[in-house]
Amino acid sequence: MKLLRSIIFLLAQIIYTVLYALLSPFIFLLNAHWRFRVLIGFAAGVLWLLRVICGINMQVRGAENIPAAACVVLSKHQSAWETLALQLVLPPHVWVVKRELLWLPFFGWLLALSSPIALNRGKGKAAMKQLLAQGTKKLQQGFSVVLFPEGTRMPYGVRGKYKIGGALLAEHSGAAVLPVAHNAGKFWGRNAFIKHPGTITLSIGKPIASKGLDANQLNAQVEAWIETELETLG
């Protein structure tokens, strides 16, 4: 039954993505804030399909911790799920993504409309300079910046190396850091086709002020909170 539901979800997701992507020329005409609001509808639709077809629900802890001011969001990365769910939970934000994702048909069109910071990771120092410059500009425009410090999706229960880019952006811009933990990989695993019914818990920690801390200290605090919080999620 899980296999059948996962097949139906995939087909529904493909059809829905193509139809939404066909609206891209019209969405492009809107300013960045309005584009964000319209694209929330895409994320909400996919999560609705996931709930109805596969029986995967969501609960949020710590929503009251989300600051009014734009911040740097550092989240655990286990699944494709959090790239959708965070759009519904967080105020206006942009993503830091691999440039190659923008080349994907249909999905890449929608991602491009979200005004992401698209990095060529092979550029090293140049990519970091781009992150700091564009990230600071987005924060000044009122957009939070969302990064996955582990860089790639990790299997459920596995800890990756927390890269320092997000913490450097917070130190450079003076923005606070908002840590996010979740257990999505338990239900929609990394590169897994089969979806398992249940309730994913998304937990948002208290903002960590960047003032008085260097990037290494910020990164260490974020990693400690996320990994400790994961133990409580199960």
Image (tube, rainbow, N blue to C red):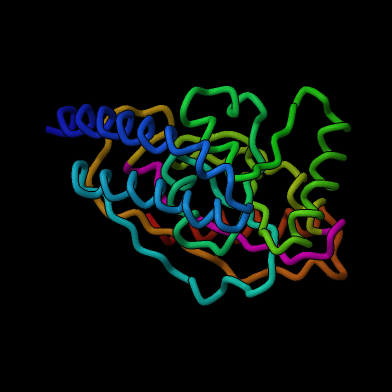
Residue 158 within the magenta-colored segment of the rendering: no
Q: Residue at x 49, y 45 (%)?
A: 83
Q: Residue at x 70, y 41 (%)?
A: 117
From this view, report whether residue 192 is shown above or below residue 164. above
Q: Quick check: 209 left or right of 2?
A: right
Between 113 and 121, the residue placed more toward the observer is: 113
Q: Position of residue 67 (x, y in %)?
A: 63, 73
Q: Look at the image and give the residue range highlighted in magenta.
A: 171-187
Q: Position of residue 48 (x, y in %)?
A: 28, 50
From this view, report whether residue 144 is shown above or below residue 65. above
Q: Residue at x 45, y 58 (%)?
A: 88
Give the number of callouts.
0
Q: Quick check: 92 left or right of 131?
A: left
Q: Position of residue 7 (x, y in %)?
A: 22, 27
Which of the 4 image quarters holds residue 141? bottom right
Which of the 4 image quarters holds residue 151? top right
